[in-house]
Image (cartoon, grey):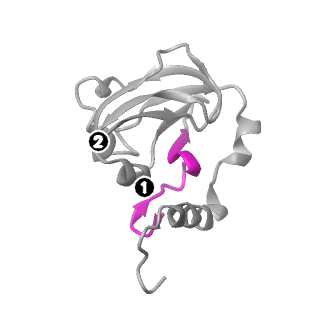
Amino acid sequence: MQIFGFDYPGECFYLLERDMWCRPLADGRLQVGVTSFGIHLSGDFFMCRPKPVGTVVEQGQTLGVAELSKSVVTIKTPVSGTVSEINPLLDDTPEIIHQDPYGRGWLVTITPSRWAQDLPQLAHGGDLQAAATARMRLENIQFPASR
């Protein structure tokens, strides 16, 4: 789905206030990354260092740090669980995050521990358009006149 020019793939679930997504994988784990809108706000990624495999995280807590063009920021996880894999491309090509945010630019996979409890805070399906638009308005994004 496109919302004001930003991609929001339908298979993903979004923690919009943190500009993060997660995608269920066939093995029950969740792939996690930064939304295209989040990348628009933050700029280019020069370094991304997720927490190590085996780290237990809770929804909204720090998942790692990223060096952007003008700052170093913490990345927050959209779901609770245990980090089970880190994208190996991040070490040598962190720019893959902003080049392909929903493809090869994923950050980690997480084995979820509280999916049912985390799910109400995630936007998906029918509520995504309104929720993402509200999120964008908080950042004073200029919308096309036709909207």
What crowding class fits label 2: few (fewer than 14 Cα within 10 Å), some (14-19), or many (20 or more)? few
Pointer 2: what residue? 70
Asked if the stretch drawn in magenta spans residue 8, the answer is yes
Q: Which of labels 1 and 2 is toward the front?
A: 2
Looking at this rendering, what residue extends furthest in the front direction? 71
Q: Secondary structure at mark 1?
A: helix
Alpha carbons under labels 1 and 2: distance apart = 17 Å
Residue found at x 76% / y 37%: 117
Q: Say left or right for 98 vs 30.
A: left
What crowding class fits label 1: few (fewer than 14 Cα within 10 Å), some (14-19), or many (20 or more)? many
Q: Nearer the viewer, residue 88 or 77?
A: 77
Residue 15 shows in this picture: no
**Which region is colored magenta?**
1-23
Residue found at x 41% / y 80%: 144
Pointer 1: what residue? 37
Quick check: 22 above or below 39? above
Q: Amino acid at mark 2?
A: Lys
Q: Amino acid at mark 1?
A: Phe
Mark 2 and mark 1 in contact (Cβ < 8 Å)?
no
Q: Secondary structure at mark 2?
A: loop
On the image, the x and y values in percent for residue 109 come to 50, 28
Q: Say left or right for 48 vs 24.
A: left
Quick check: 124 above or below 48? below
Based on the displayed image, in which of its 4 quarters is residue 28 positioned?
Answer: top right
On the image, the x and y values in percent for residue 59 come to 64, 34
Quick check: 98 above or below 113? below
